[in-house]
Amino acid sequence: MLTILKKEITSYLSSLVAYVTIGVFLLVLGLFLWVFPASSVIDYGYASLDSLFSTAPYLFMFLIPAITMRSLAEERKEGTFELLATRPLTDWQIVLGKYFACIVLVFFALVPTLVYYYSVYVLGNPQGNIDTGGVIGSYIGLFLLGAAFCAIGLFTSSVSKNQVIAFTIAVFLCFFFYSGFDSLSQLLSLQNLTLENLGITLHYQSVSRGVLDTRDLAYFVVLAGLFICLTLLVLLKQRQKSLNDKTLLGILSALVLITIISDFTFTRFDFTREKRYTISPVSRDILNNLKKPIRVTVYLQGDNFPGGMKRLQRATRDMLSDLQAYSHDELQFNFLDLLSAIKKLPDAEQKAAYDSLQARGIIGQPYSVKTDNGVTQMLIFPEALVQYEGREIAVNLFQTRIGLSDDEVYNNSIQNLEYAFSSAIKKITSGGKPIVAFTEGHHELTDLQLNDAMKSLSDGYTIGRINLKTVPFDVLTKVKLLVIPKPDTAFTESEKFKIDQYVMRGGRVLWVIDQVSAELDSLRGHGGEQMAFAKQLELDDQLFVYGVRINYDLIADISCAQIPVSTGNMGGQPQIQLLPWLYYPIFMPLSKHPVMKNLDGIRSEFASTIDTLGVKNVKKTILLSSSPFNKKLNAPHILSLQALEQEPKPKDFQSTPKTVAVLLEGQFPSDFRNRALPEGLKENIPILLQSKPTKMIVISDGDIFKNQVGADGSPYPLGYDHYMRQNFGNKNLLLNIADYMTDDSGLITLRTKEVKLRLLDRARIRTEKLYWQVLNNVLPLAFLLTFAIFQHYIRKRKYAH
């Protein structure tokens, strides 16, 4: 076999056709990767070779048939195959020798593309900012694809003596196996047959990311082995030899066995540096437990996306493919170009279509794209819809955040994909929803003020309101999360006892408390002044025992929201201007805790400071703090709108950041230890003095989960400031808290997943673009030409002697 391999390589590299074929391959590949804008590495802006591994398969469809077409067709045409068969070589040795020779030639054609890796390595920001492990894994995928195409090409070379016919059939078969099954699977009558699993695309796209799944490896081995066996069968039939070959039957049996084993068990090797394609055990358990089909429709599809949006689109497809791998084929997904589909509808139906989508949580967003001609506006739908047994949940794929660059926003969105999909799948497939209850009876926030909070939570939870005075304790213990939203009157000892014993039994509480009475509406209605005074909620002793104290003060922060203020009249019309209101701080989530990860700024109203206290077996985590430019004002304090007329001086506000939200976890002592039971308690509740492991979150702003209400009484989305026309992260904060407090599987820890942002040095690209384009198109060809001259010189010298 080694003799055949050497003969084939030497014969091929001695012909001009070989160098012309490989040269054309490298030239076209270089143009696609470095010159043409749609697929250019430079225009993409990221330090990766994704374009190489997505473009090369289509060029392989022509390169490899050009290499393999002469392998057997020429031997048969010139009659040398019979001469070859008389040598002490088996048919297997001849076929495998030629096959491995073709693979070596494909490898030889890929070696010059390492110049592309070097270029991206140098152009990285910082230099070397490329995932080398991922590139190696992707090259393995490309090599496996080449091996499969070589087997197909060798087979077509055996069925015809005409090289052109062999080349044409090979191109067709390569294309069909790469794309044909995908196209067939889109036919309505064949959609349920999962024909795409028979095609190369599904398996190659998985490996080309830098992830080697043993099922994909088995697919390429079986495909190559099948066509090698077919090649041998054709040769045996042409020579009229018996097909009773034990080796052939043994190999076919081995291929069948490999296919069966790969269906039942598999493992994956993630070559990427951050292991970004490794699915967490939490997500695997969720997917393994799927009993019925679940469908995900992604609307992030379209043409002319900028590089970052293409990266998010590709990452979404990759994530769903990874999740599908553990779902026993219960998870199916597709991408839909929603904008194009709606445009095909009559004008009268388009608005109804948009309204229907918005009601389902699919909201189009205007997006600005920088082009050579300036800025172009386009409408995108960065959402997915998860559907299961008649229920559906919308998943937002695009995680915006104030102060981040576009590249950082895309990266954060990619980091959040596993959590977003796994969380949605768990919520929609779980048998019973956890109960989240909001208290009432103490002038808490109304249903209208909590409208979007409760609506947003209702997808994954059973939402209700309870009155601590009347609710039976056994009903309270069934609540997974108790939310106390801005109470305004004092709690009785009986109510506090119920809360305390609820916590002792492992209940989770979200305290959203205003310690100081201050309202902007009251301020406007009292001549622009109001006395902010301490509330008497009678909760201080209980919170103190648990390890926290909300102080009777207000935070004035230079980082704040704006409010509309009348600044005069013109033509009988009031002049309204937005001015910063220091008592509406915007808290930036700097904590690394998964609850706060990648959240936008959190809008608040009249927040107070929090002190934490040392309590045994209770761990404290600061979630939110003010900016370093703040001032603490002790209550009572006179608030005046006249303060808006004075611009705050940052020097007067320099102070240490003040805590406004804290997470407490552990075993809490009872507030009723060494105390008599409260009078008037109507139920016999056995008292526990130490809690089970549990957690609670304390926030010193009662309005943080209150949505604004329009003049017509309709609620705005939670976190949306309709004066500033800006969305803040309040809704996502609430959803994250609910997930963290009600789920013990650790699902929310997926939000801590990190994917390194790998950018190219754009300043260097602007000044050196032409240099790198020329280098990557000329240097691979120069390498090929140098090798050709050297090989010709060695051959001439050898035969001259």
Image: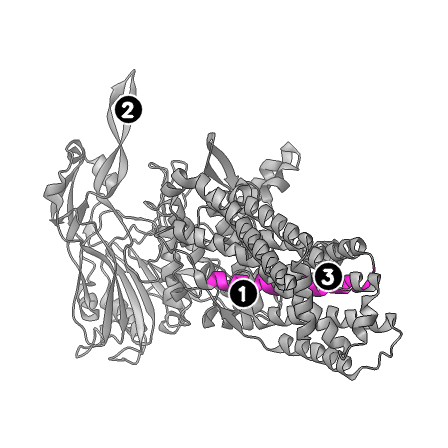
**Magenta stretch prevailing secondary structure:** helix
Is residue 207 located in the magenta-colored stretch of the structure?
no
Q: Quadrant of the C terminus?
A: bottom right
Task: Tell me, yes or no, if residue 423 can be seen here.
Answer: no
Q: Position of residue 248 (x, y in %)?
A: 77, 79
CA gap between label 3 and label 2 equals 77 Å
**In the figure, is residue 718 to the left or right of 31?**
left
The amino acid type of the residue labelled 2 equals: Gln
CA neighbours of label 2 inside 10 A, class few (<14), some (14 to 19), many (20+): few
* Nearer the camera: disc 2 or disc 1: 1
CA neighbours of label 1 inside 10 A, class few (<14), some (14 to 19), many (20+): many
Q: Earlier in the sequence, mark 2 or mark 1?
A: 1
Q: Position of residue 394 (x, y in %)?
A: 51, 53
* Nearer the camera: disc 3 or disc 2: 3
Residue linked to disc 2: 575
The amino acid type of the residue labelled 3 equals: Gly
Q: Earlier in the sequence, mark 3 or mark 2?
A: 3
Q: Position of residue 738 (x, y in %)?
A: 38, 62
131 vs 454, nearest the viewer: 131
Q: Kindly identify the residue that appears in the image at 48 percent across and 43 percent down.
A: 773
Q: Quadrant of the N terminus?
A: bottom right
